[in-house]
Amino acid sequence: PRYKMILDLDTGIDDALALAYAVGHQDIDLIGIIASYGNNLTDVTAQNSLDLLDLLGASDVPVFYGARHSTTTDDFSVMPVSKTIHGKNGVGDVAVPKSSRQVDAQSGIDFLIEAAHQYQDELIYLPTGPLTNLALALEKDPAIAHLIGQTTLMGGALTVPGNVTPFTEANINQDPEAANTVFQQQEKLTMVGLDVTLRTLLTKKETAEWRALGNQKGQLYADIMDYYIDAYYNLDIDKRGAALHDPLAVAVAVQPDYIDTLPLNMKVTTDKVTGDYGRTIGDTEKLLDETTSKAAILVDQDRFVHDFQRMMLAVL
Ligand code: BDR
Ligand code: CA
């Protein structure tokens, strides 16, 4: 494989798809999963990642605990809408067989810092949940800002309203201060936001093909994904299908030609008075500086969804 990858997941249905995609990709050596809070509690998302890794035949990939709450609160609660979209257990209330493995004893933050020093340019760090873990790692060891080869995140929105408030997307909304630390400090950063991921829709036509494989993985993944497609329908987010937010970020980290990007130094609004708390936007202070980050603006959605489906049929 060309790259070492760390997935920082709040598993989560589309996180579960991102995990399968990364497991299947020939260019990716998945060296570990950091469990984040977000779609569910950290304990639950960690267990989901262990269970899904075992289901996918990737029991050699370790799972580490990340943060249990944002950097600015000690609130452990999960947003009610997350349970509506991802199910009470995070994976569409589908009973995935429990893994007998344990979460690794090392902290996810320390694992990330160590991997940054060890692998440097070869390392892709890929968060698909809140940015709390990377912000904590940057606080502990600021050198990782330039050591990590590439950071590609799912989160934010440049040109469309958010999905939590008109200005905030869910992952950024969980910890705007942490996200701002990341946008301000982390180099070689690519933001894959909602305006792009919402164009990548999967339907029950594809999940029927997973089920038709006639094995346990295909059956369970189809059940999980159908829950998410139904939630998109019932909440009127999209009647045509459900968005491949997190897997798109994984795909473009190794195949950047799926997207067009805009070089842009960004920040996250952390001012609670201006009404746009949690917004990802260009940084006026850095308009003339060299750009250290890019925002996805377009995706070749038909090609991506087609390739994604081929990958799933190979992995499942
Ligand atoms: C993001 O929020 C989570 O619910 C999803 O897993 C995705 O990472 C979309 O806003
Ligand atoms: Ca996620």
Image: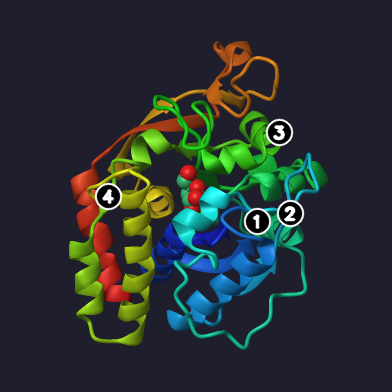
Q: Residue at x 70, y 16 (%)?
A: 273
Residue for badge 1:
37
Colour scheme employed for the rendering of this structure: rainbow
Q: Residue at x 49, y 63 (%)?
A: 87
| Position of the C terminus by quadrant | bottom left
Give the number of the mark in front: 3 or 1: 1
Q: Earlier in the sequence, mark 4 or mark 2?
A: 2
Disc 1 residue type? Tyr
Q: Residue at x 54, y 45 (%)?
A: 151
Residue 117 screen position, x and y as percent:
70, 55
Q: Is residue 264 above or below residue 122?
A: above
Cα distance, mark 3 to mark 4? Answer: 30 Å
Residue for badge 3:
177
Q: Is residue 116 left or right of residue 123?
A: right
Cα distance, mark 3 to mark 1? Answer: 16 Å
- The reply to whether discs 4 and 2 touch (Cβ–Cβ < 8 Å) is no
Q: What SS does tag 3 mark?
A: helix
Give the number of the mark in front: 4 or 2: 2
Residue for badge 2:
76
Write down the quadrant of residue 197 in the picture: top left
- The reply to whether discs 2 and 1 touch (Cβ–Cβ < 8 Å) is yes
Residue for badge 4:
201
Q: Earlier in the sequence, mark 2 or mark 1?
A: 1
Q: Earlier in the sequence, mark 3 or mark 4?
A: 3
| Position of the N terminus by quadrant | bottom left
